[in-house]
Amino acid sequence: MFKNLITKITVSLVVISIMTLSVFSTASAGGVTVFKEGDKYVKMGGRIQMQYHQKDPDGGDATDSVFFRRFRPYVEGSIHKDWKGKFQWDMGKADGSNELAVKDAYMQYKGFNNLKVTLGNTKTPFSREFLTSSKKQQLVERTFVGDHNFGSPDRMLGLKLEGHNEDKMIEYGVAFGSESIDPDNNKLDFDSPVNQNSDFNEGWVAAARVDFHPLGHLEKSQGDFKGKTKATIGVGVFTWSNDNDVQNTSSSTTTTVDTTNAACPTACPVSSSTSKSASTKDVDEATGFEVSAALRMMGLSVDVQYNSIDADTVVPGITSGIYKNGSTTLKSFAVEAGFMVVPSTLEVAAGYQSQDADGYAEEWTRTSVGLNWFIKKHDIKVQASYRMGESLKGKANKDEDEIFIQTQYVF
């Protein structure tokens, strides 16, 4: 056991060294290209996140891999005053024949006072942690409350309004559009209809949120670089409903036999019929509630969030995965904290998250510790997180430890 631990530490240090050198070599070549002439402009940028991930389940063999967690270029521009367009894609999330995943892809009007209108593929206004960009997180991976795999809506294709009062003490957002769910009883996985697979349940989502900043506007970014005391509290809600356009089915065959025919040793088949029924994995509807809060002061950064999400399957009475008797209430909680031991440069971080569902035998928990080295704040950084998971997917005595090491370059 001690030998295995030494091996893990040695491998981790080697990976950190290689990835850190990678960051420095990339940083010197990075940049931003901007064209501007009056109201016309073109801006190009992106993020590169290379990650080392190791899984070590109890009672199983450890596995590891190095990959691009996110590789997202984007182009943004305008040719008319108060209008802009943006499209962003991810080449680090290639899946099968899909060589890229569409992320942001929208047009936006900003001519109203303190209000912008967005039409296209954009983030659903629910979950402060989800709305906090992946490039501005303290832990390498988001917790349950911001994970689209566990009930937090992802990007939707539709209309969104976002605004604030004059001093930005109050922010709000409302949205309506199309969003899909990957039918899987072990999770509640939202995704944009732009990237959906053929078996995804299509549906309509409506969402709204309000954020209150009593000590001045606090951006959705983790880590305290300024040292000023800021706080926020937010509330969000959403509802999703299956539009019945995609209904998966399961087949069963029934054979009728003749038990009175003496010529057959047992029974003679007379006829057979195949019937189709709705898939036991299809989701009928889901509704969610979120309350979140954040604090920044003297190098300390704390984020807390609680989600409660109800979901029902199309087929009633299903007991599988997160569901019990065709329904579930998915309750998630997370607290994340970090402190700058070297201002704006080195941060120690820790987090605790839990998730419970009607179909779980035990509450699923994760405890994390981490270290963040900010070379150029969030633009260039190296992160390491060690996550200890217990009762994975609600199953008793199923534990797993994970190591995440990630380099990031943003331009």
Image (cartoon, rainbow, N blue to C red):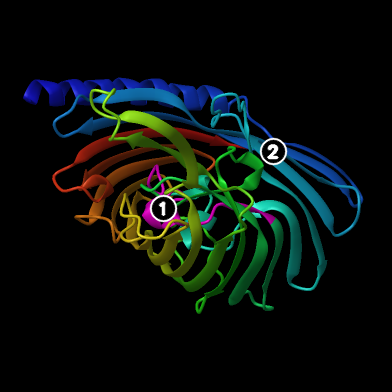
Location of residue 141 (image quadrant): top left
Task: Give SS at disc 1.
Answer: loop
Location of residue 269 (image quadrant): top left
Vertical placement of 229 versus 130: above or below?
below
In the drawing, what numbered circle is on residue 74?
A: 2
Q: In the shown orientation, is residue 65 left or right of residue 368?
A: right
Q: Residue at x 50, y 43 (%)?
A: 249
Say whether residue 20 is magenta.
Answer: no
Disc nearest the viewer among 2 and 1: 1
> At which x and y percent is residue 244?
61, 55
Amino acid beneath label 1: Phe
Vertical placement of 180 versus 43: above or below?
below
Q: How many marks?
A: 2
Span highlighted in magenta in the image: 138-157
How many C-alpha atoms fall within 10 Å of the one at disc 2: few (<14), some, or many (≥20)? some
> How far apart in space, not on screen, are marks 2 and 1 (Cα)?
27 Å
In the drawing, what numbered circle is on residue 377?
A: none
Location of residue 272 (image quadrant): top left
Q: Residue at x 15, y 34 (%)?
A: 58
Farthest front residue? 262
In the drawing, what numbered circle is on residue 150?
A: 1
Say whether residue 147 is magenta.
Answer: yes
